[in-house]
Image (cartoon, rainbow, N blue to C red):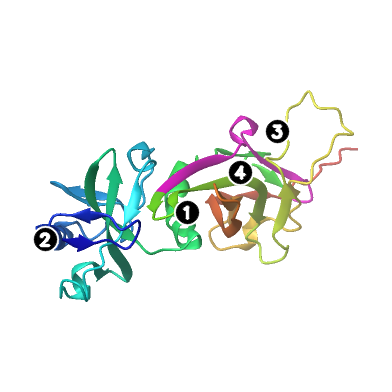
């Protein structure tokens, strides 16, 4: 008989052989996985389960009583049978005991910060590319006349993704949220500084009264004809603040995400003609 680490659970002696088969199957599955699969991502190979990060609910693990076999001294089993290294992550073999049944699974030993960082790339894919607008339009700018810039305010809202990771203490849920905060406009003329303004900017329309102004604007002091190609290479980015929180009260912040595009700004110099 084999004694488990918690609650003195007893199972039949064939568990050791079963563990060896599970380990062999998991190692073969690891070699067969594509190179771009994240080290902590959940996966299944037949009956062998990698209970890593999942982006869908994992209710099947919520009622698990996780038990780790104590086999090193009692059964003479090598520690490598129940612990393994894969792509920089330590995985440990556990048994999910539930409703009188046992299920083997590898659990990753990772921190909440590491889970949050792995979800950053996922939430990045959910961020929409906002259409960038200018007034005057990009090829009809005028020297010493404010150029307004803005994005669609209807899409100025947070996007989130939740990662679930089973642990011996219960399921850990990490929700990562990207929230649009500001616009950054780099004029590309080598003269002015980058303009930063909060919010999506104010869409310009001829119906706006003359006293309405916006912080999301830039005034070019020289025409773009001073450049060999006749345009300024500007860039407009939306800055998304990325934060995370868990179902156990821990939270933090990750590096911002900047998404935008380059723009060729043609700025003209208008001359008045005086007739007598």
Per the model, the C-alpha gap separating discs 2 and 1 is 29 Å
Callout in the foreground (3, 4) = 3
Q: What element carries label 2?
A: helix
Where residue 203 is drawn, which disc sits there? 3
Residue found 38% across the figure and 64% down from its top: 109
Callout in the foreground (2, 3) = 2
- The residue labelled by disc 4 is 138
Question: In front here: 242 or 240?
Answer: 242
- The residue labelled by disc 1 is 120
Q: Which of marks 3 and 4 is nearer the N terminus?
A: 4
Callout in the foreground (3, 1) = 1
- Give the extent of the magenta segment: 143-164
Per the model, the C-alpha gap separating discs 3 and 4 is 15 Å
Where residue 206 is drawn, which disc sits there? none
Image coordinates for residue 12, horizontal then vertical, percent: 13, 55
Q: Is residue 147 left or right of residue 253?
A: right
- The residue labelled by disc 2 is 28
Q: Earlier in the sequence, mark 4 or mark 1?
A: 1
Image coordinates for residue 55, horizontal then vertical, percent: 38, 43
Q: Earlier in the sequence, mark 2 or mark 1?
A: 2
Question: In front here: 10 or 198?
Answer: 10
Dot 3, how many residues are within 10 Å of its Cα: few (below 14), some (14-19), or many (20+)?
A: some
- Quadrant hosting residue 204: top right
Q: Does 153 appear in magenta?
A: yes
Image coordinates for residue 104, horizontal then vertical, percent: 22, 52
Residue found 86% across the figure and 41% down from its top: 274
Q: In this view, does 75 lie to the left or right of 67?
A: left
Residue 129 in sight in this render: no
Extreme-top residue of the structure: 207
Residue found 62% across the figure and 37% down from its top: 156
- Quadrant hosting residue 3: bottom left
């Amino acid at each position: 008989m084999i004694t488990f680490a918690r609650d003195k659970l007893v199972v039949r002696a064939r568990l050791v052989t079963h563990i060896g088969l599970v380990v062999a199957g998991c190692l073969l599955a690891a070699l067969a996985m594509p190179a771009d699969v994240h080290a902590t991502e959940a996966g299944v190979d037949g009956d062998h389960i990698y209970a890593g990060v999942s982006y869908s609910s994992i209710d099947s693990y919520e009622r698990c009583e996780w038990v780790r076999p104590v086999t090193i001294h009692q059964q003479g089993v090598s520690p490598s049978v129940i612990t393994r290294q894969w792509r920089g992550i330590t995985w440990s073999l556990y048994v999910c005991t539930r409703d009188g049944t046992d299920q083997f699974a590898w659990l990753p030993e990772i921190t909440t910060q590491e889970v949050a960082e792995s979800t950053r790339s996922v939430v990045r894919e959910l961020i929409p590319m906002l259409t960038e607008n200018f007034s005057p339009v990009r090829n009809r700018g005028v020297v010493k006349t404010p150029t307004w810039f803005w994005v669609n305010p209807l899409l100025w809202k947070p996007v989130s993704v939740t990662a679930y990771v089973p642990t011996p203490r219960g399921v850990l849920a990490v929700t990562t949220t990207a929230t649009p905060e500001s616009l950054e406009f780099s004029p590309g003329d080598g003269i002015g500084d980058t303009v930063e303004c909060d919010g999506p900017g104010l869409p310009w329309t001829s119906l706006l009264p003359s006293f309405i102004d916006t912080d999301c604007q830039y005034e070019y002091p020289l025409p773009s004809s001073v450049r060999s190609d006749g345009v300024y290479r500007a860039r407009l980015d939306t800055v998304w603040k990325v934060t995370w929180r868990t179902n156990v009260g821990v939270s933090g912040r990750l590096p911002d995400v900047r998404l935008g595009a380059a723009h060729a700004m043609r700025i003209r110099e208008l001359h008045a003609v005086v007739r007598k």
